[in-house]
């Protein structure tokens, strides 16, 4: 097997950075997230031992705002001169299994079911992902309950931390093989034992919940669970798999551009109609939409949950809403609705 | 000839407005073709397109295209984009992308009697199906159209309603307005009540209903009362849309995206969705 010694990591990142933008988990100011490995950032602490950093790598393939095309209007004329599909080479290093799963759900949304989103595709086709297998899940982690194998991130390369001996390096896809060839000089052949996986501390039982939710749309539990929620949307912005976006325009006089940006089902404007109506008039319907999308609707469409168990929404929520409690409550409640 | 936006589904084609017709005080029909002539792409009855001006994009059901070199969209003035559209003149260039959605069941309805029920601007999408039936008259049985608007002035496509359609073979057109008016000698009352009053026999029929959500709700109840089975009841749903291609998330009802899996559903399908419509 191939081994990457820990003191070779920086040199390896330097090497890849010669041909691609490399995103690595780092601490920047109070936050943490995936940032480009460049001269400015090299001094910042690398967070390869951290589990899922605060900001997921979602924005590398699906930026928070993404310019789509330029617009020009002159009298009655209208033109679109330039579109902005970005196909530059990118590598994301150290992605955890939960975030890798989230990227798979973005792939399913943006690239399947009739239409391929050209902006997403340009980025995604040119991204190589190096996953960092988890062996010691954190207090907020529950990916296992959501059907994610923490030691087998769905990525092009998997690295496995064996401690002082370094990382086991496994290429999993063609892209992974290509990257491995590029960094061959930093890898040595040696046999090491796989690390041992510890168990989850957060107990969640999602078994059968998606199915059960099918008959719980009008259940009074939603009222109760939504009560503390202030519909701030923080949970949706931090979520690695939330994919909703808005399409907006910036015009200066006659020219400008159309762009898309992350949007949140927690906001009233999200579903407000031009005529003034809104099918989700209060916070309760919006709260229900978010959690049903994560835990039921996505399953029906794509066959697995849109929650990957990363635990981020629990950390950011100012109101103490915990998706794990929601799952457990649904699991336990009597699903029959009293009307 | 250009076709769908398959390669870059979010980037519009540029089309030209070749004619604008005022249908009612707040509804105008826009006729568009590709810049340089020809059809932007094929739209089936019931399918939609995203029309845009710099100010924004909006999803509109195609009102008529079949066999023509242009597409027609009848659009009601309700918000920012539609205000702007109502101000443009012939020759204006627009953004257009599509076609989106599943469209009406034109194939599976063949050989059946057709019952079309519409309220207000709801006649715009339905008209593409109605005209399809007239164009292929022998493929469909008896045609019954029940249509209503707030007032006489708000009735769309008057020439067709009062002259062309009633003179078609084996066709009945019933028109109603919500409140009495001096110039109006016809039926007065809401569409769902009128449907019950006329009580068209469900045997061998497919019903297709388009209109404001509240009208749809009551009209579907009326049809059920008259004995129509779930699979004989077809309607369209509306939700706020942005992408039109099942990506941006906002137009879902349950696991279905109205832009992609709809907008046309029959009651069997609707009953499997959560009651959010
Ligand atoms: S819903 Fe919460 S726990 Fe699930 S993937 Fe999103 S942020 Fe993570
Ligand atoms: S972060 Fe908490 S309060 Fe804010 S929208 Fe999400 S669940 Fe509601
Ligand atoms: S409009 Fe974006 S998903 Fe339907």
Image (spheres, rainbow, N blue to C red):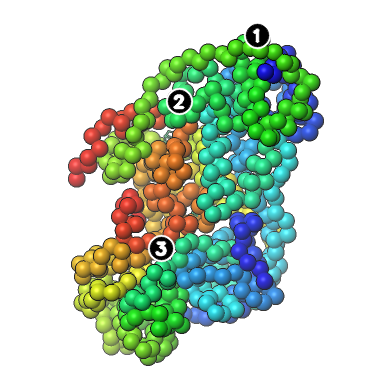
Horizontal arrangement in the rendering, residue B64 relative to residue B121 (left or right) = right
- The secondary structure type at the circle numbered 1 is loop
**Percent of width and height locating residue B260:** 48, 57
Q: What is the chain identity of the residue bearing mark 2?
A: A
Q: Which residue is drawn at 70% across and 64% down?
A: A79
Decide which of B263, A299 is in the foreground and name it. Answer: A299
Residue A190 in view (yes/no): yes
**Quarter-of-image position of residue A314:** top left
User: Would you place residue A212 above or below residue B261 in this image?
Assistant: above
Q: Label 2 crowding class (10 Å Cα cut-off): few <14, some 14-19, many 20+?
A: many
Residue at point 57%, 42% (across, down):
A107
Q: Residue B264 carries which label?
A: 3
Q: Position of residue B271 (x, y in %)?
A: 30, 55
Q: How far across and down, in percent of the image, does residue A53 sit? A: 57, 25
As drawn, the label of residue A68 is none
Same chain check for tags 1 and 2:
yes
Q: Quick check: is the Cβ at mark 1 less than 8 Å away from ligand 1?
A: no
Disc number placed over residue A144 in the picture, else none: 2
| Residue placed under numbered mark 1 in the picture | A164
Using residue B53 as the reference point, say whether residue A21 is left or right of it.
right
Q: How crowded is mark 1: few (under 14 residues within 10 Å), some or many (20 or more)?
A: few
Give the letter of the chain under mark 3: B
Q: Nearer the viewer, residue B137 or B49?
A: B137
**Circle 1 marks a residue in which chain?**
A
Quadrant (top left, top right, bottom left, bottom right) of the C terminus of chain A = top left
Chain-order first, disc 1 or disc 2: 2
């Amino acid at each position: 097997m191939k081994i990457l010694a820990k003191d070779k990591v920086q040199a390896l990142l330097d090497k890849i950075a010669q041909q691609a933008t490399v995103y690595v988990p780092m601490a920047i100011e109070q936050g943490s997230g995936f940032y480009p490995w460049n001269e400015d950032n090299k001094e910042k602490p690398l967070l390869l031992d951290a589990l899922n950093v605060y900001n997921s790598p979602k924005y590398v393939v699906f930026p928070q705002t993404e310019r789509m095309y330029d617009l020009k209007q002159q009298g009655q004329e209208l033109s679109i001169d330039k579109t902005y599909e970005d196909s530059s080479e990118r590598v994301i290093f150290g992605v955890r299994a939960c975030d890798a799963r989230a990227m798979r759900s973005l792939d399913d949304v943006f690239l399947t079911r009739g239409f391929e989103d050209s902006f997403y595709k340009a980025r995604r086709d040119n991204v190589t992902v190096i996953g960092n297998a988890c062996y010691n899940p954190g207090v907020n982690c529950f990916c296992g309950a959501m059907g994610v194998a923490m030691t087998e991130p769905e990525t092009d390369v998997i690295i496995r931390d064996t401690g002082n001996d370094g990382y086991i390096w496994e290429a999993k896809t063609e892209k992974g093989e290509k990257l491995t060839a590029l960094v061959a000089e930093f890898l040595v052949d040696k046999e090491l034992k796989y690390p041992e996986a510890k168990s989850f501390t957060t107990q969640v039982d999602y078994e059968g919940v998606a199915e059960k939710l099918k008959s719980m749309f009008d259940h009074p539990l939603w009222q109760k669970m939504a009560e503390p929620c202030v519909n701030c949307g923080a949970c949706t912005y931090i979520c690695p798999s939330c994919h909703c976006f808005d399409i907006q325009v910036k015009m200066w006089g006659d020219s400008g551009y159309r762009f898309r940006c992350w949007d949140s089902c927690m906001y009233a404007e999200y579903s407000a109609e031009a005529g003034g109506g809104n099918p989700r008039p209060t916070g309760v319907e919006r709260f229900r939409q978010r959690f049903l999308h994560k835990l039921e609707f996505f399953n029906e469409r794509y066959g697995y949950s849109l929650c990957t168990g990363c635990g981020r929404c629990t950390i950011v929520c100012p109101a103490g809403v915990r998706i794990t409690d929601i799952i457990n409550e649904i699991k336990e409640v009597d699903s029959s609705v009293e009307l | 000839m250009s076709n769908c936006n398959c390669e870059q589904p979010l980037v519009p084609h540029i089309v030209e407005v070749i004619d604008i017709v005022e249908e009612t005080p707040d509804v105008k029909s826009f006729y568009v073709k590709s810049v340089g002539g020809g059809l932007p792409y094929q739209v089936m009855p019931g399918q939609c397109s995203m029309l845009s001006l710099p100010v924004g994009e909006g999803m509109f059901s195609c009102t008529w295209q079949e066999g023509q070199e242009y597409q027609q969209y009848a659009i009601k003035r309700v918000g920012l984009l539609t205000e702007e559209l109502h101000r443009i003149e012939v020759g204006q260039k627009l953004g257009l992308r599509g076609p989106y959605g599943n469209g009406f069941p034109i194939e599976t309805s063949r050989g059946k009697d057709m019952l079309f029920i519409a309220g207000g601007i709801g006649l715009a999408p339905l008209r593409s199906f109605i005209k399809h039936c007239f164009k292929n008259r022998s493929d469909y049985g008896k045609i019954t159209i029940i249509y209503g608007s707030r007032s006489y002035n708000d009735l769309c496509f008057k020439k067709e309603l009062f002259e062309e359609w009633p003179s078609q073979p084996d066709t009945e057109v019933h028109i109603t307005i919500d409140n009495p008016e001096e110039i109006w000698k016809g039926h007065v009352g809401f569409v769902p009540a009128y449907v019950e009053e006329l009580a068209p026999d469900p045997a061998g029929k497919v019903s297709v209903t388009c209109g404001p959500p509240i009208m749809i709700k009551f009209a579907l109840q009326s049809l059920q009362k008259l004995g129509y089975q779930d699979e004989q009841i077809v309607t369209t749903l509306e939700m706020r849309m942005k992408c039109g291609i099942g990506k941006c998330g906002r137009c879902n009802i349950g696991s279905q995206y109205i832009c992609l899996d709809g907008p046309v559903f029959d009651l069997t399908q609707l009953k499997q969705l959560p009651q959010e419509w």
